[in-house]
Image (spheres, helix red, strand yellow):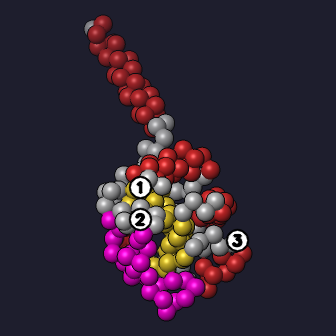
Amino acid sequence: MTRARWAPLALFAVLAALLAAGVWLSRKPGREALPSPLIGKPTPAFALPSLHAPGRIVRAADLRGAPYLLNVWGSWCPACREEHPVVTSFAETKRLRVVGYNWKDERADALRWLEQFGNPYWLVLVDMQGDTAIDFGIYGAPETYLVDANGRIRWKHVGPLSDAIIHDELLPQLHALESEHGA
């Protein structure tokens, strides 16, 4: 009978330990980040119009020859507004081309947004329907990709960029890329 008395307490202790372990593991940074299967692979083939020249179609091959940062954004995205000053500051360093990827946005809204907050982009691609986004594995905005001169995706970040992410994640990737190519 003594063991039967302690069984509920033992069960409670086991459940409490499992709960504590779950809480401890959930503190791990980036736990919700999904690794991109495209890292190290060529960017998906695309042909997208330019925001500022809708008749101009830009293909993935057109961007090869120099590395670039592809930043997914939309005027409807509150987190994009939060990250915009960071993207602008990085673009001003002229370390590499910053290409905007305007996702599921009305052209007039996107243009108005850039007029209001500034345009840090070397070029802005438009994916109104989101078809190309599926090929990239984009599931939210903002997202950012580092693409090398050969058109291979080298790094991906989901969520808003911050100065710390640029310093701790993007710049080391960029340095490694430059070291590989003797830049």
**SS under mark 1:** loop
Q: Is residue 51 within the magenta segment? A: yes
The quadrant of the image that shows the N terminus is top left
- Relative image position of residue 76 (x, y in whole percent): 59, 72
* Vertical placement of residue 23 versus 140, above or below: above
Q: At 64% across and 59% down in the image, what residue appears? A: 93
Which residue is label 1 attached to? Answer: 181
* Vertical placement of residue 99 versus 16, above or below: below
- Relative image position of residue 27 (x, y in whole percent): 49, 36
Single out the mark in the foreground, 3 or 1.
Answer: 1
Q: Earlier in the sequence, mark 3 or mark 1?
A: 3
Residue 171 visible in the displayed image:
yes
Q: Is residue 67 left or right of residue 119?
A: left
Any mark on residue 149, and which? 2
- Relative image position of residue 3 (x, y in whole percent): 28, 10
What is the spatial separation of the Cα atoms under label 3 and label 1, in whole angstroms? 35 Å
* Vertical placement of residue 126 versus 91, above or below: below
Q: Amino acid at mark 1?
A: His
Please tell me in which quadrant of the rendered image residue 136 appears.
Answer: bottom left
Q: Nearer the viewer, residue 110 or 43?
A: 43
Q: Earlier in the sequence, mark 3 or mark 2?
A: 3
* Vertical placement of residue 94 versus 14, above or below: below
User: For the magenta stretch, what is the residue range?
Assistant: 42-65
Any mark on residue 117, and which? 3
Please tell me in which quadrant of the rendered image residue 20 appears.
Answer: top left
Q: Amino acid at mark 2?
A: Ala
Q: Determine whether label 2 and label 1 are within 8 Å by CB.
A: yes
Q: Nearer the viewer, residue 174 or 5?
A: 174
What is the spatial separation of the Cα atoms under label 3 and label 2, in whole angstroms? 29 Å
**SS under mark 3:** helix
